[in-house]
Amino acid sequence: MTLYFIGLGLYDKKDISFRGLEIVKECDYLYLDSYTSLLNSSKEELEELYKKEITLADRNLVEQQAEEILEQAKRQDVGFLVAGDPFGATTHIDLRLRAHKAGIRTEIIHNASILNAVGEIGLELYKYGKVTSIPFDNEKIDTPVEVFRLNQKNKMHTLFLLDLEPSRDRFMTIHEAVEHLLSKGLQPKQRCIACAGLGSHVPEIRVGSAQQLLQVTFTKKPCCLIIPAEPLHFVEEEALEIWK
Amino acid sequence: MTLYFIGLGLYDKKDISFRGLEIVKECDYLYLDSYTSLLNSSKEELEELYKKEITLADRNLVEQQAEEILEQAKRQDVGFLVAGDPFGATTHIDLRLRAHKAGIRTEIIHNASILNAVGEIGLELYKYGKVTSIPFDNEKIDTPVEVFRLNQKNKMHTLFLLDLEPSRDRFMTIHEAVEHLLSKGLQPKQRCIACAGLGSHVPEIRVGSAQQLLQVTFTKKPCCLIIPAEPLHFVEEEALEIWK
């Protein structure tokens, strides 16, 4: 029997792949990771599309009750559904590792994640450096700015992922993120690219100085922020014109 | 009318998303990028699935005859199909930019790319630095080793993409890539992870020293190589155990 890790993509129920959907329909049991990311379709909408019941796996289930999932995968085909790509989060690597140790076959159905969706804004994907996250409680946190400085020094673009708690419908805004970075010494004139709902087919993308972006209201979620390493290649420079 | 950029994912015709497939079926005209990556399904297999004819877009068409695609997109819905994610390659950014300038609406349907598929090997995705490619003619090329050294110095993992010419069924092997790196000063004992067919549901992944990997035969394609920045987090270390 197999434990399938199935990426659902970045927007809603329609972003699953054809292969993923075929496997979901064959699985005996389905879990949906409900805490690491956001999908604009409810559990019920997915159940309707799949013609199958889904068990929500919250942080507690995945990290502490992984045994339950593994026991099932010994006897039946189990699908573990994750918004985005299955291995954006280390938690799922751990579940896969445990499956491996228990002698359970695993198979991965990849999908888009924010790491390739940022390609859409037009900065060369190969030139990104380390990725960093801005957490909600960030007063004493210096990591995002430190990663940014390290990347800048090495002429690498920086992607900041903004914190989210989908279960509480709580999403950090671009405004909050920019204010955090300014409080840690970012120059108000620093050119940034702000994205909301990136990876969906209807994202909001704006380029401007940190200061300017404070004035922009975004309606989509989740959000991320990119600071390019200057100077840009002329194709990158031209591409950013789209978002002014 | 809209120019759709539609990612086909990493393995074969079944990796397109449900949304992508819906849009393909609505498009009046379809182009398939035939040179930047590999799909294990022929144009004919895709045509059968889509119930629609496809025009192959070779490098010449996309870079020099973009006008033809744009003219069509002014009057009809056009789908531009790309293996992997649409914006892995800068060429497509350029096409999108031209569409924007010509006042043509664009929409992006993302999919998995090698940049998130590497998550499967178990190294933290956020800790990767710049990505580099090893070209076929590499005797006088130092970029891959230079990028590796820069990443190592900053404790970032390095992903090397190995060259490919799908139209001529030519793919650089792990053996060739490792020999190139050794000739440029890589230590024979350096720990590396070699992947073939990564992103498919049946990849080959092996971890070992550069020297050891020279002895391994891989049957899948295309290939990539990862050199981790030591020391690893203990979960990363454990994850690599799977591939020994």
Image (tube, coloured by chain):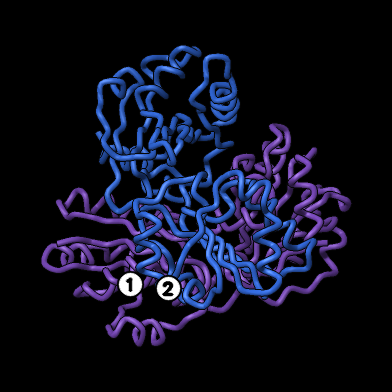
Chain colours: A purple, B blue
Instruction: Kindly indicate the quadrant of the structure image that contains residue B123.
Output: top left
Q: Is residue B74 left or right of residue A199?
A: right
What crowding class fits label 1: few (fewer than 14 Cα within 10 Å), some (14-19), or many (20 or more)? many
Q: Is residue B151 visible?
A: yes
Amino acid type for the residue under numbered disc 2: Phe
Labelled disc at residue A21: 1
A138 above or below B231?
below
The chain identifier of the residue carrying mark 2 reads: B
Q: Label 1 vs label 2: CA separation?
A: 8 Å
The label nearer to you, 1 versus 2, is 2
Q: Nearer the viewer, residue B232 or B49?
A: B49
Query: Is A227 positioned to the left or the right of B107 in the image?
Result: right
Q: Quadrant of residue A163?
A: bottom right
Query: Which numbered circle lies on residue B18?
Result: 2
Residue type at mark 1?
Leu
Labels 1 and 2 touching (C-beta < 8 A):
yes
Q: Position of residue A194 (x, y in %)?
A: 73, 61
Residue under the image location 18 percent in, 67 percent down = A77
Where's residue A1, x and y in %? 14, 62
Q: Is residue A210 left or right of residue A149?
A: right
* Residue A94 image point, x, y percent: 33, 52
